[in-house]
């Protein structure tokens, strides 16, 4: 049994990494003991929706600021970076594509010269794959918490890109429904939901760029020169995701407008055809109504062939009117 086996269920990971990147599982109570020895090691703790008492325990072990702990207790923070003494507090929004819809959550991070604490809330993928990948690269882990922080932020941004790609594929499929012969009410509803999700994605990605830019120039947490290019790469990815989302939002808005325009045109065509048939039926109705009046002196009223002539006139009028309406595409 490892050292962290007795940890609460919300503690996903609690480990110390030495200067060579080798992992050693520890308990929460042992964190302060590890940090007390200046041997180049650092501690990485991963939490998922922790209780207030557990955050209080971490505040005691790491010496975290009370305001930062208060922010981490409530999963309704805007993406931001705040500096507290010798540690940083970073709040980011995360996203997951679940059952055809984008769900949003938050990841809060406390990072110092010898520790990283990640606190996940809501829809947020586990960082187990991030840890496993880093542990296969001890040289990268040897750079300390900055390497772990980069890996977490890179994972979050890459997930943004993955979701943006999936939304783009969904939009391509919806565009086929937009130009379908029959109107589908569900198409315009999904387009609206898609635009809403993209707007929420934009609200998560845009501040992430500010956080990354601010992180690389903050004096509280010195990023080693060897790791800075990796953070610049994440910033570049975040900028590209932001551009992709902006483009998709414009495409969704255009698809919604086209859909509504096509519906309006289709309704206009139906009105034209109804008006054409109404005009076609009006001619014989008008002629028949004249001869239904009780007048004595009417054309062909007493003629031998009046009935046939009248029918012929009605037929010729209807045929001529039908030909004209068909020519102007009203029928």
Image: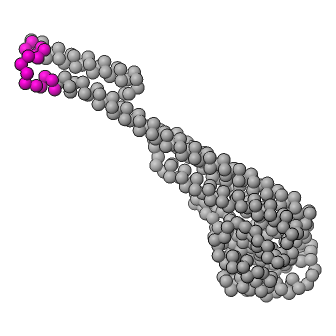
In this picture the colour scheme is: one colour
Q: Is residue 186 above or below residue 111?
A: above
Residue 2 seen anywhere in this rendered image of the structure: no
- Asked whether, in this view, residue 298 is left or right of residue 281, the answer is left
Position of residue 225 measured from the top left corner of the image (x, y, whole percent): 92, 63
State which quarter of the image contains the N terminus: bottom right
Q: Quadrant of residue 299?
A: top left
- Start-end of magenta stretch: 289-303
Residue at horizontal 64 percent and vertical 62 percent from the top: 96
User: Image check: 110 left or right of 35?
Assistant: left
In the displayed structure, 148 sits above or below 286; it is below
User: At 33% from the left edge and 31% from the top edge, which residue is drawn?
Assistant: 275
Which one is nearer the viewer's eye here, 289 or 48? 289
- Is residue 291 one of those drawn in magenta? yes
Taking the image as drawn, is residue 91 in sight?
Answer: yes
> In the displayed image of the protein, which residue is found farthest to the top?
304
User: In the displayed structure, does residue 105 sit left or right of residue 114?
Assistant: left
What's the magenta bit mostly, secondary-structure-wise? loop
Q: Residue at x 64, y 73 (%)?
A: 75
């Amino acid at each position: 049994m490892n050292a962290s086996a007795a940890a609460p269920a919300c503690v996903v990971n609690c480990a110390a990494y030495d200067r060579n990147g080798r992992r050693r599982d520890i308990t929460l109570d042992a964190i302060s003991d590890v940090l007390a020895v200046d041997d180049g090691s650092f501690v990485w703790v991963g939490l998922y929706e922790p209780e207030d008492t557990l955050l209080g325990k971490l505040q005691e072990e790491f010496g975290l600021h009370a305001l930062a702990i208060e922010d981490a207790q409530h999963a309704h923070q805007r993406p931001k970076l705040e500096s507290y003494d010798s540690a940083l507090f970073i709040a980011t929004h995360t996203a997951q594509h679940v059952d055809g819809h984008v769900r949003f959550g938050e990841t809060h991070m406390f990072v110092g010269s010898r520790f990283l604490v990640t606190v996940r809330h809501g829809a947020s993928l586990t960082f187990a794959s991030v840890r496993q990948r880093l542990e296969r690269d001890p040289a990268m882990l040897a750079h300390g918490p900055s390497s772990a922080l980069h890996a977490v932020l890179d994972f979050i941004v890459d997930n943004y890109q993955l979701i943006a790609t999936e939304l783009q594929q969904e939009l391509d499929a919806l565009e086929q429904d937009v130009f379908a012969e029959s109107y589908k009410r569900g198409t315009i509803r999904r387009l609206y939901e898609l635009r809403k999700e993209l707007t929420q994605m934009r609200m998560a990605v845009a501040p992430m760029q500010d956080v990354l830019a601010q992180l690389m120039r903050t004096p509280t947490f010195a990023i080693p020169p060897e790791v800075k290019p990796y953070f610049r790469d994440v910033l570049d990815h975040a900028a590209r995701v932001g551009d992709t989302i902006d483009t998709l939002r414009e495409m969704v808005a255009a698809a919604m407008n086209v859909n509504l325009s096509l519906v309006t045109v289709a309704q206009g065509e139906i009105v034209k055809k109804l008006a054409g048939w109404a005009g076609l039926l009006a001619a014989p109705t008008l002629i028949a109504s004249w001869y239904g009046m009780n007048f004595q002196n009417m054309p062909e009223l007493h003629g031998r062939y009046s009935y046939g002539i009248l029918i012929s006139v009605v037929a010729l009028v209807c045929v001529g009117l039908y030909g004209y309406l068909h020519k102007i595409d009203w029928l």
